[in-house]
Image (cartoon, grey):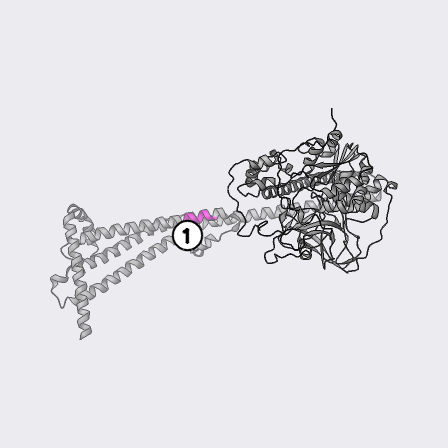
Amino acid sequence: MESVIERIKRGSFSQFHGGIHPPEQKFLTCSKPIASAQIPEQLIIPIRQHIGQAGNVMVKVGDKVLKGQILSDCDSPMSVPIHAPTSGTITAIKSMAIPHPSGLSEACIILTPDGEDTWKQRHICPEFHSLSKTQILDKIANAGISGMGGAGFPTQVKVSTLAKIDYLIINAAECEPYITADDLLLQEHSPTILDGIKILDHLLTPKNILIGIEENKTKAIAALKKATADIDHIDVCVIPTKYPSGGEKQLIQILTGQEVPSGVLPSSLGIVMQNVATCFAIADAVINDTPLIKRVVTVSGQALEKPQNIWALIGTPVGFLTDQCGYKNSQNRHLIMGGPMMGFSLPHDQVPVIKTTNCILAPSEIEIASPFSSTSSKEVECIRCGQCADVCPAQLLPQELLWSAKAKDQAQLAKLNLFDCIECGACAYVCPSQIPLVHYYRVAKAEIRQQKLLDIKAEKAKVRFEARKQRLEREKVARVEKHKKAAEARKARMNTDTSAAKSEKSAVADALARVKAKKAQASLKQNTAEGSVTSTVEMTAESVVPVDESKSQVANAIARAKAKKIAQKNQAQIESLDTLQNNESPSSSQAAPVVIDKKAKVDVAIAKAKANENKPQAETISDSPNAQVDARTKAIPLEIVNLASDSDDKVTQALNKKAKVAAAIAKAKAKAKAKTAANLAAETSFDSAEPSTTPANIDVMQDSNTAAQADIAATKKARVAAVVAKAKAKKLAASSNKSTTSE
């Protein structure tokens, strides 16, 4: 069976699924040498520039630092330190915008250069073979090197694997359009890159080293073949140009024919891959003791007068690099960090260059329209053409991923292997509906990562809570046990005949005596309160009868006052009518005084009857044994009864309620009787021939009520006549008053 190396030497490579061929546009910068950028006036250095945790800041505002001095240390394997790109002063440590598709802000160190570019002390080691593997790994870790191809994975973690490595693959494909940073680095610094490859060979001891490079980089291919001509186990593999052949899984499949399963690291298959720029940084760190403080950045695009590759210090603002390249589109700045396929638009030009920045793209509006301009294509509904699935190199289903991402269905996204997406942008490139698919995938990934962090925090909080609960239980048990032992020890001491035991016994006896005294005092207070409550209840019960008697007396007085008032009113009306009779005939005004006189007398009779009816009841009450109370007790109003003892409010409220109900019933009965008597008197008055003022006539009127009820029509007629007579009397009275006033 033909081996991988034999197939590679024969020029036969495997193919990955999908892929596209976008316009390369590499001619803008591939033929120009790498330029050195000037030192900007201010460097913005994010504390975290890699995948993993941020380091701990070791400087403070006002500190003066030297070039290469460490600014943050790492306290975990996934933490990478950062260093001062030049000498200067730390002027601020604050949150600023970082290179991220979301435009988020994170903690950054602001360094103001002093212009001297003074280095810290360095230890040059031209012969790295004299160093142990541990020393080499420490140098790589202390130099702050992370993957410079775009992923940003900590390099010391990747190269310290204990797995047996068959293939060390050096990624020099650089498949994305416009980007030529690795191409120029290979052309100008291939010996240093080869030193980095040798250091990795020393650490990993692979069977074969494969350098994968696309066939469109002719000068770099020539430089690599020349540098590796005398090394047998290093092969320069020139692969066909196709995007995204530079992806880790895609390049592994092209060179070895092996497909990396989902969720599996290549190291478990015996494969480790490193980028060309990472190899250069490893050699610089191990041999020259130079931390990662600069990198090659491709500054390209048709909006620039001088597009080129530049050695840029980490933390250099993007706007500083574009100004050096003659950026013409200053009115409508549209800058992209990364290539046109995997890059993202920047919110402004003060975003800094970091370790994973390989390209700054400044396109014209014709070349790549700004997402905010009128010429940019607008997203429309998916037409389900399936082209995105055809070109996906990871063999995913971009259309279903889009639906799940919009629906925020994280469980379905996990089933569809969202994190296998390398965000190459091939699906968005071929989408006829102009849907920014990669944007939706990035947002969904960020939400899932955030949810995982929240879940981890919640789990840690739960663990802390359970630990605290167990600790409190232990402390409680220990406290009980301590008290138990102390009691036993005290009991044992008291059983001895020493003076200390006697004093302790007396102290215990005193304490018990105090406790008994307190209990006795509390019991006495409780008994006193119960006695006062009983006496109050008895007093309240005795005062109910006088209250009823006083209520009856009040009702009688009110009835008599009402009768007197009605009599006075009727008498005044009779007198006024008598005055009017001098000017009119008796026939026209006779009915009114008769009616009024009879009504007044009936009201007086009813009031007297009510008074006589209530009087025996009062006498009966006064004869009862409970009525032998003094006059002052009988006169107690209802409000005083309501203020009876606060110790038993329920009894007092019941008694008050009973008294009120009795008074209301008596009042209602009195009103009903008075109304009935008045109606009978009024109906009888209309059947009488002439008025009568004697009390005996009341009985005659009551006896004639039967005849009045028998003749209902006559009664109605009499009522109408009475009303008419009353109206005429009022009219005559008004006329008389008017004539008197005129005279």
Residue 502 position in % (x across, y down): 81, 43
Residue 28 position in % (x across, y down): 67, 49
Front-lying residue, 28 or 96: 28
Front-lying residue, 616 or 726: 726
Q: Secondary structure at mark 1?
A: helix
Residue at the farthest bottom position: 743
Q: Is residue 633 visible?
A: no
Front-lying residue, 663 or 447: 447
Residue at the farthest top position: 1
Q: In the figure, 149 relative to 117: above or below? A: above
Q: Is residue 548 left or right of residue 576?
A: right
Secondary structure predominantly adopted by residues drawn in magenta:
helix
Is 655 colored magenta in this rendering? yes
- Specify the amino acid type for callout 1: Val
Point 18% across, 66% down: residue? 733
Q: Is residue 663 left or right of residue 534?
A: left
Q: Which residue is mark 1?
A: 547
Is 484 colored magenta in this rendering? no
Q: Is residue 467 visible?
A: yes
Residue 700 position in % (x across, y down): 18, 51
Q: In the figure, 149 relative to 326: above or below? A: above
Front-lying residue, 23 or 618: 23
Pointer 1 local density, CA inside 10 Å: few below 14, some 14–19, many at least 20? many
The residue segment tinted magenta is 652-659
On the rendered image, what quadrant is the C terminus found in? bottom left
Q: In the figure, 625 relative to 257: above or below? A: below
On the rendered image, what quadrant is the N terminus found in? top right
The quadrant holding residue 576 is bottom left
Residue 581 position in % (x across, y down): 15, 66
